[in-house]
């Protein structure tokens, strides 16, 4: 955690207009202990002062990723992000809980700071299940244009135009296997699976896939399920 904070400050997990989401992907054997540690952490003065959404997700089918859970903090702007991590370094209580209790029940898998390039939906907190597609894109501007057009058409056709969905990029802690990721939010697992199945069989998806086949490679697909908000 200390090394991550140092790297982020030198280089320098979506609520309303959130612009920076940090994901801590972890492997957990005792999920209930992580929930307990997160609750304690968020009840500190540091946790209460965070200008961010604070959520814990579990992974459903997770492709090649070893992580079982993801801790995600989403900030509305650069100042909120900077304040969170500067103040963490000044809070011994928060450091002790994170480094002794939380990390005592989990194994770090990956950490990344992500920002949306384009998205729909004012509040991702209304969605509880997310389909995430990690992709390698060679022509970002061309892909974004096709993705916007396709996403708006298919969401309206399948009836999830009020859900959150979009395209994001990891800007710190980037995984070398992918350059972008797409997310689609749904209220529950049932609707996530049924809408995804419908999308894959729709002619609009076939048309979109053909247009981006030369500039996009799907690296991994995952499902995340909201466990708790703090």
Image (cartoon, rainbow, N blue to C red):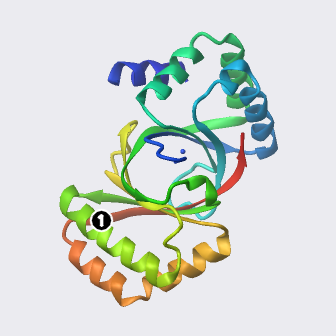
Give the residue displayed 35% in from the left and 90% down from the top. Answer: 203
Residue 108 location (% of width, % of height): 58, 36
* Position in image of residue 32 (x %, y %): 81, 44
Work out which quarter of the rendered image holds the N terminus and state it. top right
> Tag 1's secondary structure?
strand
Q: Residue 138: tell me if it is visible.
A: no
Whole-percent x, y for residue 229 in the image: 70, 45
Residue 70, by quadrant, is top right
195 up-or-down from 43: above or below? below
Q: Is residue 101 above or below residue 68?
A: above
Depicted 27 relative to depicted 144: above or below: above
Q: Residues within 10 Å of mark 1 (few under 14, many from 20)?
A: some
- Image quadrant in which the C terminus is located: top right
- Residue position for label 1: 217
The residue under the point 74% across, 22% down is 44
Among the 4 quarters of the image, the one containing residue 37: top right
In the displayed structure image, the side of residue 56 where residue 43 appears, left or right: right
Could you tell me residue 212's position as x and y percent? 23, 72
Q: Is residue 124 left or right of residue 149?
A: right
Give the residue at x 48% y 72%: 161
């Amino acid at each position: 955690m200390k090394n991550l904070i140092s790297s982020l400050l030198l280089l320098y997990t979506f609520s309303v207009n959130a612009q920076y989401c940090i994901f801590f992907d972890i492997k957990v054997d005792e999920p209930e202990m992580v929930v307990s540690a997160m609750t304690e952490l968020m009840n500190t003065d540091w946790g209460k002062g965070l200008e961010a959404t604070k959520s814990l997700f579990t992974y459903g089918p997770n492709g090649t990723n070893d992580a079982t859970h993801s801790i995600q903090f989403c900030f509305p702007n650069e100042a909120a992000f900077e304040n969170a991590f500067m103040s963490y370094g000044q809070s011994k209580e928060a450091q002790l809980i994170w480094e002794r209790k939380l990390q005592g029940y989990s194994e770090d898998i990956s950490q990344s700071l992500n920002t949306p390039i384009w998205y729909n939906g004012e509040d991702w907190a209304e969605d509880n299940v997310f389909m995430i597609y990690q992709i390698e894109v060679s022509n970002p501007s061309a892909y974004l244009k096709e993705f916007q057009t396709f996403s708006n058409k298919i969401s309206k056709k399948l009836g999830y135009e009020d859900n959150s969905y979009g395209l994001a990029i990891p800007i710190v802690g980037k995984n070398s296997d992918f350059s972008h990721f797409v997310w689609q939010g749904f209220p529950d697992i049932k609707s996530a699976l049924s809408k995804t199945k419908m999308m894959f069989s729709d002619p609009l998806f076939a048309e979109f896939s053909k247009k981006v086949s030369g500039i996009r490679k799907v690296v991994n697909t995952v499902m995340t399920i909201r466990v708790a908000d703090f």
